[in-house]
Each structure stands twice: as C-alpha cells, then as structure tokens.
Amino acid sequence: MARPYSKDLRDRVAALVVSGATCREAAARFGVGVATAVRWSQRLRTTGSAAAKPMGGARRRALASEREWLLARIAEKPDLTLRAIQAELAARSVVVSYDAVWRFYLREGMTFKKKPARRRAGSAGRGQEAGPLETPPEAS
C-alpha cells in the first residue's frame, strides 16, 4: 500500500505557496506534481495543516446482523452452497458478494470441503477399483 508524503515536505510546499509562490513553482522546486501542491496548499488554508488524512480503518462486517440466521440455515441444511446462501440473502434484501459469505463462514470456523454429507464428487482415482468383467472358468 502506498504511503503518504512526509509531513515536512507537505509543510514546506504548502508554506511556499502560501508565502506567494505559484503552485507550479513550488511543485518544480520540490519535485512533486502541480495538483499535489494545489491540494496541500488548499488543505493548509482550510484546516491549518497540510498533514495527510488518516489512511485505512476498520471494515464493516456486512453479515453481522444476519449471523443467527446464517448459522441456523447451514445447520438446517448443511449441503447448501455459498451461491445458494447468497441468493437466499438477496431474497431477504441483503445483497452481498460471494466473498463476503465465504469470509463470514471462515470467521465462524466453517469450511466447505468435499465431505460425504455434502454428496460432492470426490477426486479422480480415489474410488474403489473396478472388478473384472468376467470370472475365469474353473480348471478341473
């Protein structure tokens, strides 16, 4: 992830613009873009500081309010696919991505592996060996 420019550089560019230099002159002197010099000087005038705005933050969990329903639904019918759960949520007016449903169940400690209860196809070559087509006659 990109990092903001240093506060020192921001302050020097913005101070030069506020002291009377043009944004183009300040940008050329300090090696930053003209638009960057404009934004920093505007921020200094409006807020009193050219410091960067905070980055990042916590993400809202879209399915937190549906937790009880989702857990009850998968307990009731364990062979539901994530796409089917996503469609049922959409019918309940909760529009979320496939990935949001996946992450919800992952946080709850549930995985969707190939299990007999889910009746999914196993990987090739793992089944029972094929028997002979016919049995040989008994020798007398």
Image (cartoon, grey):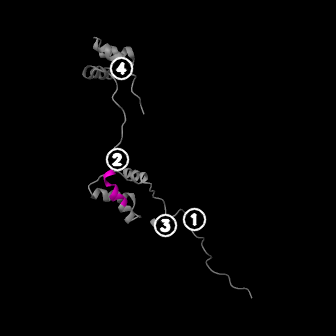
Q: CA distance from mark 4 to mark 1?
A: 63 Å
Q: CA distance from mark 3 to mark 2?
A: 31 Å
The CA distance from mark 3 to mark 1 is 14 Å
Magenta segment: does it hold 90? no
The quadrant of the rendering that contains the C terminus is bottom right
Marks 4, 1: nearer the viewer: 4
Amino acid type of disc 3? Pro
Going from N to C along the chain, the mark reached first, 3 or 2, is 2
Instruction: Kindly identify the amino acid type of the residue bearing the numbered disc 4.
Output: Arg
User: Which residue is most to the front?
Assistant: 68
Crowd around label 1: few <14 · some 14–19 · many ≥20 (10 Å): few
Mark 3 nearby-residue class (10 Å; few <14, some 14–19, many ≥20): few
Which residue extends farthest top? 20
Q: Secondary structure at mark 2?
A: loop
Residue at x 42%, y 51% (from the top left corner): 107
- Assess whether residue 65 is covered by the magenta stretch: yes
- Which residue is label 1 attached to? 126
Identity, as a three-letter code, of the amino acid under mark 1: Arg
What x and y, as percent, mark residue 88? Answer: 31, 59
Local SS, label 3: helix
Q: Which residue is mark 2?
A: 61
Magenta-tinted stretch: 64-71
Helix, strand or loop under label 4:
helix
The Cα atoms of the two marked residues, 1 and 2, are separated by: 39 Å
Q: Residues within 10 Å of mark 2 (few under 14, many from 20)?
A: few
Classify mark 4: residues with Cα within 10 Å, few (<14), some (14-19) or many (20+): many
Q: Which mark is residue 10?
A: 4
Residue 84, which numbered label? none
| 4 and 2 marks in contact (CB < 8 Å) | no
The image's mark for residue 116 is 3
Using the image, determine if residue 40 lies above or below residue 80.
above
For marks 3 and 1, the one nearer the N-term is 3
